[in-house]
Image: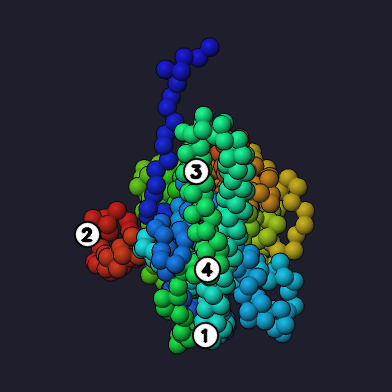
Amino acid sequence: MANPMNSTPLEEPVLDLNKLLSVLWRRRGTIQKTTLACLALALLYGFLWPKTYQAVTTVKVPGTSTQAGGSSIQDMDFLPATTDAMETYIQIAMADKVAAGVIEDLSLATDPIYGKMDKAKLIWFLQHQVKVDNVKESDLLSIAARGTSGQGAANLANAWAQSFIEVNQDLNQESEEARYKFLHSQLNSIRTKLEADQSNKQNYLNQSSEAEADQLIYKSLLEQEQESRIRSNNENTGIVVVDPATVPDKAVSPKKIASVILGLLAGLFLGAVAAFARERMEDRVYEERDLTQAAPASLWASVPLLKNKDEASALAQARTPDPDFAHGFKSLRAHLLVVRPESGPQALGILSPRPGEGRTLAAAHLALSLSQAGKKVLLIDADLENPDLGSLFGIETAGVPGLSGLLSGEAGLKEASKPSGIPNLTLLPAPTGSTDFSGALSPSALKKWVGEAKSKFEYLVFDGAPLMASPDAVVFCAALDGVLLLARWGVTHRKDFQEAVRMLQAAQVPLWGVLLNGVRRESGSWLDLWARPAQKAARTRPAPAHSKAAGFRT
């Protein structure tokens, strides 16, 4: 059994604020749409929702002491002795009996709107339109009523207060009547006993002390009975209306400004939640760490997205390069020259998990950047199923032998290759319209040819087929010195990139590095946005003298 003391503790997740801000910035469209939707709902509610008015009636209750002409709520026999007076008054004020009295007083049963409800539902509805509270722990109760009109709210509050007073009168009367009946029965019992004792004078004289006690009890009960008779006939409960409700001038809801603010806050919150949910569900590559975590290699370069598709042509970039786009491939070129400075001629492949991720564009512009640095480069189209290099250079490839014809001996390098129109860069295109690719790239023949081609070129750049679409694409990699695996920002799925890495590892293909392609210029972290002007200024400075000595050329 493993010793828990020797187990490796789990690392606590670290909150990366920069990454969180990056996700929010990248998904700002989702946040904007969600916020606008919530704002629209808030505006509809604020300006189109029916107005609600509130009126308040204030009443004074006896509290815990008996008032003149009235009775304390503790005198009601049906209540426990420990009942809090104010809490009990509030409970009585919200009772069904009070609501029923309001329905009768305002004739709501025959109202065109409320008359459609049955009595139980109407009572429930009214109870949710009224709120009773104790005013600052005093002997005052506020009865707040809401309605769709100011007059209706005031009528409801005043009617509710009046019904509350009437219900309390009924409860007091019932309590005093029950008390009177009890005292009257006890009084009759004592009177009967006294009369029986007086009829037996001898017995009455022998028990004179007991008789005196009965006389005192009889007198006390008689006084209480008379008092109870008076109180049962008294309709004053000590509850009075202090401040009747008046018709309010302004509605209490909807509150337009508050609705807009709440809508904005709710939209931002829900938008952020939706942004992180989409980020998790899509599982696409957006961060450099997504590549470096999946592959045992470092990131060599991040290349921005070309907004103008016409600028994707290698010839167009050679004549009028896009500064940011060209800088990405200069970084890739520099990384290659620094990592392998004296390894002799190099044969490397540019691969991607799936089609449409910019693999061909990256291979072409890496070759262009190397040729601009004075390196003699041969660019090979090894994607025989979907050759596309010729179109980037404006070269017709119909009928050319291509790599397969060269390896089979049908043509030599001179016949199979085409001038690219760019100094130091030669193109070996693939034929279009071919459908038979079985055995086209023989590993042994390719390895032999690569060795021969290195004697004429400093760099052989292969545009390989997508790994997930063409599993045989790793076959020709055995003849290469290494490969760069490419992922496209916002397009490549993380799981596809991880699977492509596993395929290369299974085939023992040396993975030099990874490349993030098609990065949107306004994307990335907020810190990157602050840093971009400084980076742009740094790129416009004159190159130091030692860069030319190293073979760099802009």
Outermost residue to the top: 1
Q: Nearer the viewer, mark 1 or mark 2?
A: 1
Which structural element holds mark 3? Answer: helix
Sequence-wise first label, 4 or 1:
1
Q: Which residue is mark 3?
A: 215
CA separation in Å, label 3 and label 4: 29 Å
- Answer with mark 1 or mark 3, whichever residue precedes in sequence: 1
Residue at 27% across / 57% down in the picture?
A: 547
Q: Earlier in the sequence, mark 2 or mark 3?
A: 3
Q: CA distance from mark 1 to mark 2?
A: 84 Å
Residue 102 locus on image (x, y percent): 61, 75
Of mark 1 and mark 2, the one earlier in the sequence is 1
Q: Residue at x 42, y 78 (%)?
A: 243
N-term mark: 3 or 4: 3
Q: At 65% from the left edge and 70% from the top edge, which residue is drawn?
A: 100
In this view, 208 is above or below 32: above
> To which residue does mark 4 refer?
234
Instruction: Give neighbour class at mark 4: few <14, some 14-19, many 20+ (Cα, 10 Å).
Output: some
Q: Amino acid at mark 4?
A: Asn
- Identity of the amino acid at label 1? Gly
Q: Nearer the viewer, mark 1 or mark 3?
A: 3
Q: Which residue is mark 2?
A: 545
Q: Nearer the viewer, residue 290 or 255?
A: 255
